[in-house]
Amino acid sequence: MRRTLRAFPICRNVMARLAGLCLVLSMSTSASATENPEAVDRSTLRVCADPSNLPFSNDKGEGFENKIAELLAAKLNVPLKYTWYPNTVGFLRNTLRARRCDLVLGIVTGAEMVQSTNPYYRSTYVMVSRTEDGITADTIEALQKDIRIGLTAGAPPADIVAKSGLASRTRPYNLMVDTRYESPGKDMIQDLIDKEIDVALLWGPIAGYFAAPHGDQLKMMPLTKETGTSRMEFYITMAVRPGENNWKNDINALIRENQEEISAILRSYHIPTLDARRNLVP
């Protein structure tokens, strides 16, 4: 999951949104947050985002987080203003914590350095395969030992792949990249189409978005039946600065009142989401 999960994500791409950008807070930043706990510009919706990180965001407004930001700004009846910064080490410190914006739209619940809103979706890592191959495995452990696996380095499925004796069958794809020039998730799906690999293990939002143009050629299996310590599912929230409780409550109200429209945006980007019982939402 780059932001695979502000991931895998910060702990982005959910990875690095999701693979472990857990950052250290400077004393000066922490002190300023304490002195000015409510430093929100209410005249505009100030959002920090990656300028080249589809399906999440880009500077052309084409990502699903862009569309959700536009929805929130419209509901608040204020203009939308972006601060662009690559979703990598230093993202939160140099954007939200530096007061260059007041909201980050995609971060894992409980991430350090920020205060999380209520979650607005829950997704999971998935296994993508070619429909014609008839792969029916619903866990990584159930894959045949001769399967060629595409895997984001450092992502949660990596531990299960290693424990299942499949490490020698993997093709690694970089987690931390300059998203202006590289798109590992897109590359992994294309390699699957080109039969360079047989299975792609990806953070759901990335997999759904890049697999969608290939229609029925590809199928996705949510990795919700995996056992062990590796977590495959994550609640995704928005992030505000610690201490800004009034602002957090306002954003929570916006999420609650507009969840149906937010969910419709997610569906339009083919983002696989889970309900409270861990079932895929149609």
Image (cartoon, rainbow, N blue to C red):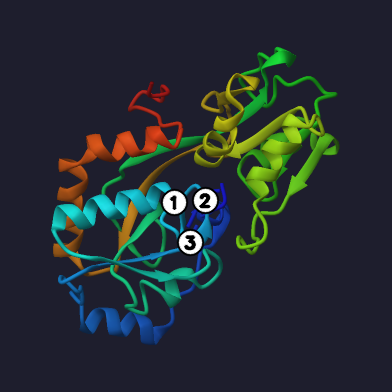
**The residue under label 2 is which amino acid type?**
Leu
Q: Is residue 103 visible?
A: yes
Mark 1 vs mark 2: in front? 1
**The residue under label 3 is which amino acid type?**
Ile
The quadrant of the rendering that contains the C terminus is: top left
Q: Residue at x 44, y 37 (%)?
A: 269
Q: Is residue 155 above or below residue 40?
A: above
Upstream in the sequence, badge 1 or badge 3?
Answer: 3
Q: Residues within 10 Å of mark 2 (few under 14, many from 20)?
A: many
- Residue behind mark 1: 62
Q: Is residue 175 above or below residue 87?
A: above
Front position in the image: 15 or 101:
101
Front position in the image: 64 or 9:
64
- Residue behind mark 2: 54
Q: Which quadrant of the structure image shows residue 175? A: bottom right
Give the secondary structure at mark 3: loop
- Residue behind mark 3: 10
**The residue under label 1 is which amino acid type?**
Glu
